[in-house]
Amino acid sequence: MPFDLASRLAARRVEHLYRHRPLLEGPQDPEVVVDGERLLAFCSNDYLGLASHPEVIRALRQGADRWGVGSGASHLVIGHSRPHHELEEALAEFTGRPRALLFSTGYMANLAAVTALVGQGDTVLEDRLNHASLLDAGLLSGARFSRYLHNDAASLAGRLAKAAGDTLVVTDGVFSMDGDLADLPVLCAEARKRDAWIMVDDAHGIGVLGAQGGGVVEHFDLGLAEVPVLVGTLGKGLGTAGAFVAGSDELIETLIQFARPYIYTTSQPPAIACATLKSLEIVRREPWRREHLNRLIARFRQGAAAIGLTLMDSPTPIQPILVGGSERALRLSALLRERGLLVGAIRPPTVPAGSARLRVTFSASHDAAQVERLLAGLDECWKLLPEESPCPRV
Ligand code: PMP
């Protein structure tokens, strides 16, 4: 039967892979009302607690008063206004790159950068755990596409040896489902040996990593020569919406001239750019947010290890608990929810089969007592979870 959507949906249910959208009744905060229930949430990417910061909200409101709501057009027509421009300058300075280019989402920034840089006859090499938008970008580009083993320089080197044309190595800066960092100094060295370029998608590191919040490139002290293409998103650590690509003047001009996901779309509302400018100011002026976050992460890791949970090698606010099968992950999430705790279960195809997990994320707006509540809930629920053969590390 053509378009047998009912069967496809039924199969998703049987495999415990059906996805549900929790309905939120307020702003991003640790305490939220979801689907009518008051819960303590550990699943937002609002890592610094800026999404509902009063100064950011005020900047958005004032931006709307001054610039209206819709941007009216694409950047190249008449949708590139002063706040967009100022934000691009601020992001360039923040990342230590000559220029930055603003996008409405990280998904689009990734599609734009990869497809503008490589095409038929070229090669794109990606970490096998890269975010879906990077994998989609690689496939869309038409370049020869290959995935190397996670964070594995030898595997990358093998693929680089067989690459043809311009070669782009693409990696998450912080892996979104594991929380670990790309081993950038080593990966960059491999790429340089073969004149390949590295593109880093630092969606989860911007604002969070580095002494000034400059992200994974600040953490490893990598300049333009090592990482010529840097992508950051604004809807996570910075608490607003959108994304940017930062790099040389030539890179940015190339994107403006050739990147279809940049050219053929309406620019983000200028008031959002006003809000992000305020977020950047707060990221710089309030390092306590990163320090507090790091204390919460350290306490969680220590407490979770004491319970016997399997964590991953993550120094970031993304702290997954490996569970194994999808059904088991859903069960643990449901048990926690019965105790007022909201933690999302992440299942294939988002993560490899057999590595379903609870993706715990922390925010600077959590307090120490809330982390203790989570640990107490996990201690109780983990014991109630039926046994499964030890989950494989993939
Ligand atoms: N890259 C990574 C690593 C991500 O985790 C995400 C979002 N989950 C994106 C890109 C896409 O960013 P956006 O949500 O702004 O489209």
Image (cartoon, rainbow, N blue to C red):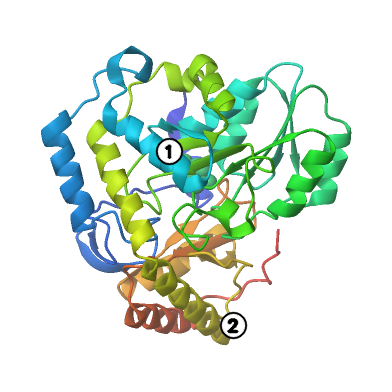
Please, which residue is most extreme toward the left here?
65
Please name whichever residue, 132 or 165, is drawn nearer the observer in this view of the structure. 165
Please name whichever residue, 314 or 85, is drawn nearer the observer in this view of the structure. 85
Mark 1 Cα shell of 10 Å, populated few (<14), some (14-19), many (≥20): many
Q: In this view, does 115 lie to the left or right of 7?
A: right
How many angstroms separate mark 2 from mark 1 (CA)? 38 Å
Is residue 149 among the parts visible in the rendering? no
Q: Which mark is residue 308?
A: 2
Which secondary structure, mark 1?
A: strand
Please name whichever residue, 390 or 16, is drawn nearer the observer in this view of the structure. 390
Q: In this view, does 56 lie to the left or right of 161?
A: left
Which secondary structure, mark 2?
A: loop
Is residue 386 among the parts visible in the rendering? yes
Residue under numbered circle 1: 243
Q: Residue at x 41, y 84 (%)?
A: 376
**In the image, what residue type sits under mark 1?**
Ala
The C terminus: image quadrant? bottom right
Q: Please state which of the two labelled residues, at mark 2 or mark 1, is closer to the viewer.
A: 1
Mark 2 Cα shell of 10 Å, populated few (<14), some (14-19), many (≥20): few
Q: Residue at x 54, y 49 (%)?
A: 15
At which x and y percent is residue 291? 43, 72
Q: Residue at x 30, y 73 (%)?
A: 340
At which x and y percent is residue 75? 36, 20
Above or below residue 176? Residue 109 is above
**In the image, what residue type sits under mark 2?**
Gly
At which x and y percent is residue 154? 85, 49
* Mark 1 sits near ligand 1, with its Cβ under 8 Å away: yes
Above or below residue 72? Residue 132 is below
Q: Quadrant of residue 250?
A: top right
